[in-house]
Amino acid sequence: MTTSPENSPVIPFVGGDFLDADYQQICQLLKEQQGVDLTGYKDLCIKRRIASRIRAAGLPGPQPYYALLLDDPQEQQQLLEALTVHVSQFFRNPTTYDLLERQVLPELLERARAGKAKLRIWSVGCATGEEPYSLAMLCRKLLKAGDLFSIIATDLSAEVLQRAKRGLFAPSRLAEVSETALTNYFTAEGKDYRLADEIRNQVRFFQHDILSDQPFYRADLILCRNVLIYFSRLQQQRVLRTLAAALPVGGYLVLGRAETLVPACRDLFRCIDSAERVYQRLETNGDPLPVRGAAAEQ
Ligand SMILES: C[S@@+](CC[C@H](N)C(=O)[O-])C[C@H]1O[C@@H](n2cnc3c(N)ncnc32)[C@H](O)[C@@H]1O
C-alpha cells in the first residue's frame, strides 16, 4: 500500500475501481498503437490485469498509467503480456498434444480412412498460429499415403492473423518444440525462426468472430483453448453450442487447461480427459442444435 503526501494511506487501485471512460481510453490506445482489439473480452478480467500493471508501476490509478503508456512502448508490451490475450506457443501444454497424438488423432484418422473422408480440424482463436501449425506438424507425423486432412484456423483479430501467415516466430514461442521438429521445420532468420512452407501451406487462416452467428466450418476436431476464459458465462454457453453444432457425434473438442464446460452445455459433450479438457460430442435427445457454426467448405 502507498501513502499520500499527507501520509494518509492510499488504497491500491483494483479492477473494479475503473471508470468506464478511463478503461475505454486505455483500450483505444492498445487498439491504435498495438493493433489489439479488446472488444468481446470479459471487461472485469481485463480490468483486473490492467490494475495489476498500474500497481506494479507504483501508480495510483489509470490516468497517470495512461500517460506512462503513451510515453513508453515497453510498458505497452508488458501490459500486453499481462493481458496474455494473443499469447500462444507451439505445443502449448505438451501433455494435451501427447493425448492428441496417442489417442484422438489416430482414432479420427482411422474413422476418416474408413469413410474415405478428409480429416477436418478447426483451431478457434488461433492467435499467431502456433496452435494450428503444431497440429499440422502432428498430422504429418501420423499421416499415411492417401490420407487427406485440412486445418482451418480462425481469429477475431486481423493483426494476429497477418503475423500467423508471416510464419516468423520468436524463440520464446518455440520452447516446447522437439529437436527433430526444430531441425525439420524451422530455419533461423535473424533473432527469429522461419517456419517451413510445407507446414505453413497446411493451414488456412480466416478472420471470424466465434461470438457471431455466422455459419463457419464443420470439423472432426476443434481446439478452442484459452479463448473462453475471456467470455462471460452466457457467451461461453453460446460459443460451446456453436462448436457442438460444428462437430459430428463422436467429434472432439479441446479446451484450455483453465477452462471447463459451463453446466448448461454438459449434456452436449462427454469428458474424455478432465486434466487435458478433452471432450467428445454426444448425441442430443430431441434437442436440435442451432445450425450456426456448421457449413462452409463441406
Ligand atoms: C490467448 S489466445 C489463445 C491462442 C491459442 N488458442 C492458444 O491457446 O495458445 C486467445 C485468442 O482468442 C482470440 N479471440 C478473442 N475473442 C475472439 C472471438 N470472439 N472470436 C474469435 N477469436 C477470438 C484473440 O484474438 C486471441 O488471439
Image: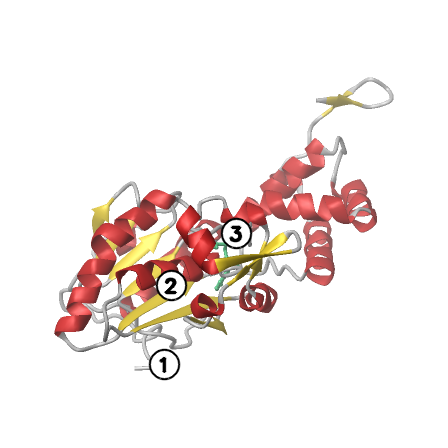
Q: Which residue is mark 3?
A: 42
Kindly check if marks 3 and 2 are in contact, taking CB atoms under 8 A apart as contact.
no
- Amino acid type of disc 1? Ala
Q: Secondary structure at mark 3?
A: loop
Q: Is residue 142 above or below residue 158?
A: above
Measure how far apart labels 3 and 1 are at the Cα level: 29 Å
Task: Please indicate, yes or no, whether residue 227 appears anywhere in the rendered image.
Answer: no
Q: Which quadrant holds residue 246? A: bottom left
- In this view, the mark in front (2 or 1): 2
Q: Which quadrant holds residue 108? A: bottom left
Measure how far apart labels 2 and 1 are at the Cα level: 21 Å
Q: Earlier in the sequence, mark 3 or mark 1?
A: 3
- In this view, the mark in front (3 or 2): 2
Measure how far apart labels 3 and 2 are at the Cα level: 31 Å
- Ligand 1 near label 3 (Cβ, under 8 Å)? no
Task: Please indicate, yes or no, whether residue 220 appears anywhere in the rendered image.
Answer: yes
The numbered mark at residue 136 is 2
Kindly check if marks 3 and 1 are in contact, taking CB atoms under 8 A apart as contact.
no
The percent coordinates of residue 111 (x first, y second) are 16, 68
The percent coordinates of residue 28 (x first, y second) are 71, 59
Nearer to us in this view, 153 or 263: 153
